[in-house]
Image: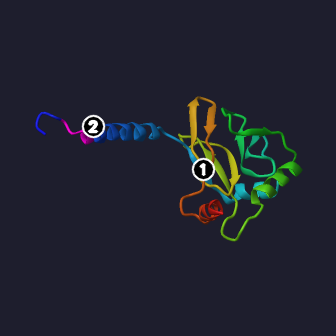
Amino acid sequence: MSGKIFPLYYIIVIFFLLFSYGCAALSAPTGGLRKRMEVEQLFESATLLPDHTYYIYGSDVEPEAIIAISNEFRLQTKLWSQRDWTAEELKKAVFWVEFVESDFCEAKGGVLLAPDGQEIGAWYSKRDIASVRQPSPGVVEVFPFRYRWGSPCERIERIDWRD
């Protein structure tokens, strides 16, 4: 084997380079979600936040998440659908987020945080992890929410996928 480089060596080197690049791309600063009971209570009481624009992820009858973005920011998205709600319409959306809620998998709420930690809005969902990026000043991107690994909601979803 002298003089020849074993092909596995190339595979290992390529894998290492791709893994390193992927980690570097993922290490870009991101914001996220912070649970806050008083925000959760605002959604549950159908209190619309002034100077905020509302969006849903998912359908009107099965929204996975509701967000309210401060009008100081513009949401850049192809995933979230803007809603101009009345309090009654917000109440219905919250009902559908909570629909089929169990004792172990409950909707939560809190604040959306930009990468610098600034509060840019509010959220309500059973899913409690998300990334928020700020590609330019005054512009934010909110990526789809997901369940925390090992949470009761995530385990229920995994069981549902088996059926």
Q: Which residues are magenta?
A: 5-9
10 Å neighbourhood of mark 1: few (<14), some, or many (≥20)?
many
The residue where tag 1 is placed is: 33
Q: Nearer the viewer, residue 16 or 2?
A: 2
User: Which residue occupies 34% across, 41% down?
Assistant: 15
Does any portion of residue 105 appear in the rendered image?
Answer: yes
Task: Please name the amino acid that badge 2 sits on.
Answer: Tyr
**Residue at the outermost top position:** 136
Image quarter of the N terminus = top left
Please, is residue 9 above or below residue 91 in the view?
Answer: above
55 on left or right of 104 = right
**Count of marks overlaid on the render:** 2
Does any portion of residue 52 appear in the rendered image?
Answer: no
Q: Nearer the viewer, residue 135 or 157?
A: 157
**Residue at the outermost bottom position:** 103
Image coordinates of residue 75 in percent, x first then y, are 68, 34
Task: Please name the amino acid that badge 1 sits on.
Answer: Leu
User: Which residue occupies 66% across, 53% down?
Assistant: 110
Q: Nearer the viewer, residue 39 or 85?
A: 85
Please, is residue 115 above or below residue 104 in the view?
Answer: above
Please, is residue 121 above or below residue 39 in the view?
Answer: above
